[in-house]
Image: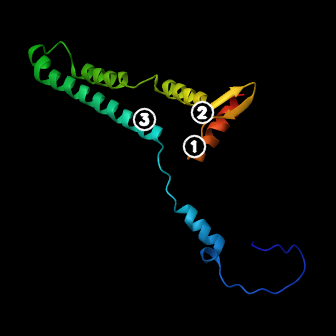
Amino acid sequence: MATMITNGTGKGIVIKTGANTMIGSIATLTSGAKEEKTTLQKEITNFVIIIAVLAVSTVAVCLILWGVWINKTHPSFQTTPNMVINAIAILTAFVPTGLPIAVTLSLLLVARKVFCIRKHFLIFKYSFKNKNFIRWLETKCWSKI
């Protein structure tokens, strides 16, 4: 694998195999690297956790109020199956339907600040330490042109 010979005959001595070779040690080092979350992924995760806590706490308050107060004073007003349906509706109402659109628009605004696009020429304005972001952004920009 690490030779420039293309044809002929010869003899060789194997001194290392598998993970003990230089290529094997490089493969071991690259497979052991952990992928960290980006700032955007961390912020979206925090936002989703906050929304989930708010949704579950709102449903819990509604179920407690129904069980302690409304069901005792007005037993025929809200039945148990209807209250379960209402709880599911409350949980569904907390799902932010505009979140993917908001994230896409914010990435578009960042891309406009980073790149100056004029007549199909990309002029890079800032330097980033994270090269994966630039590659991803280039892929998205070029696929849209």
Residue type pointed to by label 1:
Phe
Q: Earlier in the sequence, mark 2 or mark 3?
A: 3
Where the C terminus falls, by quadrant?
Answer: top right
Residue type pointed to by label 2:
Val
Q: Secondary structure at mark 2?
A: helix
Residue type pointed to by label 3:
Ile
Q: Secondary structure at mark 3?
A: helix
Place residue 70 in its image quadrant.
top left
Select label 3 or label 1 by which is in front.
1
Where the N terminus falls, by quadrant?
Answer: bottom right
- Alpha carbon separation for disc pair 2 and 3: 21 Å
Along the viewing direction, whichever of 39 and 74 lies nearer the viewer: 39
| Residue of label 3 | 44
| Residue 128 sits above or below residue 8 on the image | above
Crowd class of label 1 (few under 14; some 14 to 19; many from 20; radius 10 Å)? few
| Residue 61 sits above or below residue 14 on the image | above
| Residue of label 1 | 128
Disc number for residue 50:
none
Q: Are marks 1 and 2 in contact (CB under 8 Å)?
A: yes
Along the viewing direction, whichever of 97 and 126 lies nearer the viewer: 126
- Alpha carbon separation for disc pair 3 and 1: 21 Å
Image coordinates for residue 39, horizontal then vertical, percent: 45, 40
Picture residue at 57% right of the left edge, 27% below the top: 108
Along the viewing direction, whichever of 98 and 42 lies nearer the viewer: 42
| Residue of label 2 | 114
Q: Secondary structure at mark 1?
A: loop
